[in-house]
Amino acid sequence: MNDDFSPRLTAMRDALVAEVDRTGAAGTTPVRRRRPTRATVLAVLAAFVVGGGLTGGLTAAALPGADPDAAVETQLATSARYQVEESNHATVLGTPTFLVTHGDRTITLDDRPRGADAITVSWTCLDRADLRVAVDGTRVDVGDPCLPSTEDVDRTSWSMTPVDGSGNSTVTLSGSGPARYAVWVSWMQRATIAEPSPQQDAETADGVVTLQEYTTAFNRLQACMAQAGHPMGEVPLTYSADGLWSSTPGGDGPWYQYGIASESVEAFDTQCYPREFDDVDTIWQGEHPMPYEPPVDPALRD
């Protein structure tokens, strides 16, 4: 299968990681860290795969190899692997299946690898189509018309679907007429996500989070990250007033704002944040919504 990272895509991935590190480095504005939604991840991934204004665009013709199908395969494989391995800290297993086809197709995934508990599907339309995608009968597409990618817009879609049992699974695609589409499918194993600690369960049991509970939970998050070898440093509570951030009480808030370096993200996402802070953070931010528009000057001031 032609699903290795090309040198250009590897460089783009490294550039994205460097940008994440830069924005989280000392001297830059700390940011509130929340687990991204699938829509957020897809938006980030589209910027990564295509490059947009950062790279001048990445089209199938720019991908390695003269065979346009091989180029599309590389595009889909790179998208799926980045989503699975980088965004979700999971593992692609087995031998992926790639097809360029049209109409209705069913892909049966047999020879289930040990540990496989989900299926990842990445697809793109080469012609405008009404494409429906399902895993074991469950729809994973959003129902919108499937449009081809352009130089400026990548329209690669992606899904990760848990599967039960130990047998085969199927991916069913229903296309419209002769409109062509490409699909990349593989078994995968999801990351193990820590369960909430008893302390966090107690703090959220009544559905309300106090400031004391919010700060106590964040202190546990910091302790967990430090124990994992990724100390977060000093993170003050911050308030928003008159379009400015401040560590002085007053205005809206408070919230903890912080950056996570790339080498710390897996420990944060899979262990410390879900164990000590995720549920508390969700309730607190529901009770204290952060201003939608960022302040004019987001730098902290005393």
Image (spheres, helix red, strand yellow):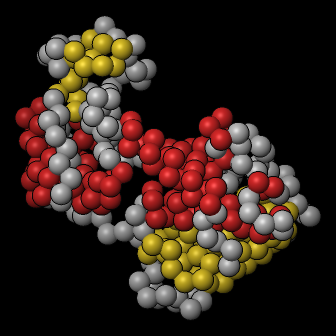
Which residue shows up at 71% across the image and 48% down it?
58
Return the x and y of residue 195 as percentages of the image width and height.
22, 63
Q: Residue furthest right?
A: 178
Which residue shows up at 24% across the image and 64% down it?
194
Q: Residue furthest bottom?
A: 111
Which residue shows up at 57% across the image and 87% down it?
168
Q: Quadrant of residue 266?
A: bottom left
Residue 159 seen: no
Q: Residue furthest top?
A: 242
Q: How many numbered marks, from 0 up?
A: 0
From the viewer's perspective, tell me whether residue 296 is left or right of residue 129.
left
Return the x and y of residue 271 as percentages of the image width and height.
24, 60
Residue 257 seen: yes
From the viewer's perspective, tell me whether residue 223 is left or right of residue 134.
left
Return the x and y of residue 131 as percentages of the image width and height.
76, 59
User: In this orientation, which residue lies closer to the viewer: 255 or 105?
Assistant: 255
Return the x and y of residue 36 as percentages of the image width and height.
42, 46
| Position of 242 relative to 143 (above/below) | above
User: In this orientation, which residue lies closer to the viewer: 20 or 175?
Assistant: 20
From the viewer's perspective, tell me whether residue 139 is left or right of residue 73.
left
Quarter of the picture containing the N terminus is bottom right
